[in-house]
Image (cartoon, helix red, strand yellow):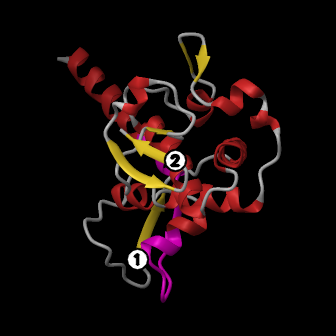
Amino acid sequence: MRKLLVLASLFVATVFFSATETFAQTTVRYVKQGETFWTIAKHYNVSLLELQRINQKQTDVLFVGETLRIPQPISQADKDLLARLVHAEAKGEPFAGKVAVATVVLNRVDHPNFPNTIRQVIYDRSGGYYAFTPVQNGEINKPADREAYRAVEEAIAFRGLGSGSLYFYNPKTAKSEWIRSRQVTVIIGNHVFAK
């Protein structure tokens, strides 16, 4: 009986301290007049869906003074890397195409068949080839422009709200029959997006 009591106490202490630690790492925000999930997600550079999920919200309704927990944002280093990829992959494409390229990377991070971080997704190799041409040819190392950073911020805020694109390609240059066999989700500019 004494062993059972000790084990139960240890379990309760572990759960309590784990919950306290997690809460201590979470930013808390009190909703102000005129704020929406969208404006708060954009301000903190977090996904709108993740913000709703962590606060167990099924609707868009917020009340002034309500307490919201803010999920951990994507690091500045990851945003910089993603913006450089967007700039290299979607130079000359419309803004929506740049957002869609960033969204593909975020969708891959969230998908079980791909690595779990932005960096790992961008530098992923398969069959000796990098997943993204700018990594192979060094264009990833060139600075991103302001529009690429804006596209990354938009993709982060809308994370999880798109059509689930995991791939994109330019039909004029793509040689792979496999990529052409994927279900097309949208065509933006010179890129076909697919899953």
Please tell me in which quadrant of the rendered image residue 161 appears.
Answer: bottom left
The span shown in magenta is 19-40
Q: Residue at label 2?
A: 191
- Please count the marks in the image: 2
Q: Dot 2: few (<14), some (14–19), or many (≥20) neighbours within 10 Å?
A: many
Residue drawn at the location 31% of the way across and 78% of the way down: 61
Please tell me in which quadrant of the rendered image residue 36 appears.
Answer: bottom left
Residue that sits furthest to the bottom in the current view: 33
Q: Residue at label 1?
A: 66
Q: Is residue 22 visible?
A: no
Residue drawn at the location 70% of the way across and 24% of the way down: 136
User: Percent position (x, y) of residue 58?
Assistant: 25, 65
Going by the image, does 7 lie left or right of 93? left
| Above or below, 33 relative to 150 | below
- Please state which amino acid type lies under the numbered disc 1: Glu
Magenta stretch: residue 59 in it? no
Q: Dot 1: few (<14), some (14–19), or many (≥20) neighbours within 10 Å?
A: few
Residue that sits furthest to the left in the current view: 1
Q: Alpha carbon of mark 2 to alpha carbon of mark 1: how far? A: 42 Å
The residue closer to the viewer here, 108 or 180, is: 180
User: Percent position (x, y) of residue 146?
Assistant: 75, 61
The residue closer to the viewer here, 133 or 80, is: 133
Going by the image, does 52 lie left or right of 94? left
Residue that sits furthest to the right in the current view: 142
User: Percent position (x, y) of residue 4?
Assistant: 21, 19
| Above or below, 101 relative to 135 | below
Q: Which mark is residue 111?
A: none
**Upstream in the sequence, badge 2 or badge 1?**
1
- Assign a secondary structure to mark 2: strand
The residue closer to the viewer here, 64 or 82, is: 82
Q: Is residue 32 visible?
A: yes
